[in-house]
Amino acid sequence: MSAFIPADPDFGEELPAFRKSEEAIELLARRRSTAADYLADPGPSPDELDAILKIAARAPDHRRVTPFRFIVIEGDDRARAGDALRGAYAVSNPEATPERIEAEARRFARAPAVVAVVSRVAKHHRTPEWEQVLTVGAVCQNMLVAASAYGYAAQWLTEWYAFDPQVAAAFGLLETEDIQERFAGFVYLGSASADPKERARPDMSAITARFADVTPS
Ligand SMILES: Cc1cc2nc3c(=O)[nH]c(=O)nc-3n(C[C@H](O)[C@H](O)[C@H](O)COP(=O)(O)O)c2cc1C
């Protein structure tokens, strides 16, 4: 069956201000991440992945900075990208066993598709860095939700390699006078080989106040 690919709205097209959907509420209220070790084949088709990325990119973005980009790691690229992990891990962990280094090189192979979400902060833009970074978080969350709606399980991971300068260089991340790129994370996508269980959730009364009850700090 071919994937449902919604039509792109035209620029300036009038769009509904809301879309009442019990299905969407259910998806959001019950969404769970699935650990990368349980993300099996099949992954999203090329059309589905394009749609998932397009939906992810519809995150709120103050002044349309587009402070993010994607690097897709699929098929044989998972091993090639894994070579960067092997090299970086071996350098940072000179005491590591060869088995451990090989296990690190196989990280991207856990799922059929991995999307590196690159945060791309425009350093001198009128939109503060903080807001740009918040946009990238929203992009990742949109991706998780879109993946679920397409029937795929997903997990947003940083692990060690999101913070490793050698891995960043191998992925071509930029640091210039104007641009700072960093990994927001790696979104692993696939078909769940086991369903996740509900996790502990925040006590809503502990994190929600009415303004009338606020004590000035
Ligand atoms: C920026 C970011 C980085 C994360 N990195 C990791 C990670 O490296 N390892 C991990 O086990 N979970 C990581 N997580 C958490 C999982 O993605 C997931 O949110 C968590 O397991 C809770 O599951 P839930 O999404 O179903 O609530 C990260 C989450 C975020 C937002």
Image (cartoon, helix red, strand yellow):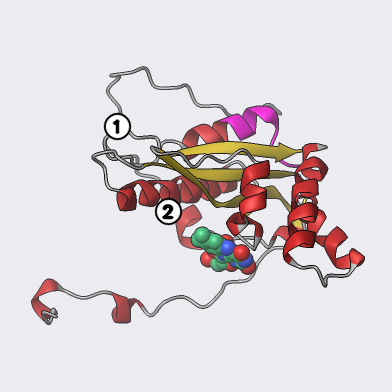
The span shown in magenta is 42-50
- Residue at left offset 26%, top offset 74%: 208
Q: Position of residue 181 (x, y in %)?
A: 49, 44
Q: Nearer the viewer, residue 88 or 21?
A: 88
Residue 200 is left or right of residue 110, and the answer is: left
Residue 11 is left or right of residue 216, and the answer is: right
Residue 23 is left or right of residue 157, and the answer is: left
Q: Is residue 22 visible?
A: no
In which quadrant is the N terminus drawn? Answer: top right
- Residue at left offset 78%, top offset 53%: 87
Q: Position of residue 184 (x, y in %)?
A: 51, 51
For numbered disc 2, what is the local secondary structure? Answer: helix
- Residue at left offset 40%, top offset 45%: 21
For numbered disc 1, what is the local secondary structure? Answer: loop
Ligand 1 shows up in the quarter that is bottom right
Magenta-colored stretch includes residue 43: yes
Q: Nearer the viewer, residue 146 or 177?
A: 177
Q: Which residue is under mark 2?
A: 25
Magenta-colored stretch includes residue 212: no
Badge 2: how crowded within 10 Å, few (<14), some, or many (20+)? few
Mark closer to the chain start, 1 or 2: 1
Q: Which residue is under mark 1?
A: 16
Tally of numbered tags: 2
159 in relation to 176, above or below: below
Q: Is residue 14 visible?
A: yes
**Which residue of the protein is positioned furthest toward the right in this rendering?**
98
Q: Position of residue 140 (x, y in %)?
A: 50, 49
Q: CA–CA distance between discs 1 and 2?
A: 17 Å
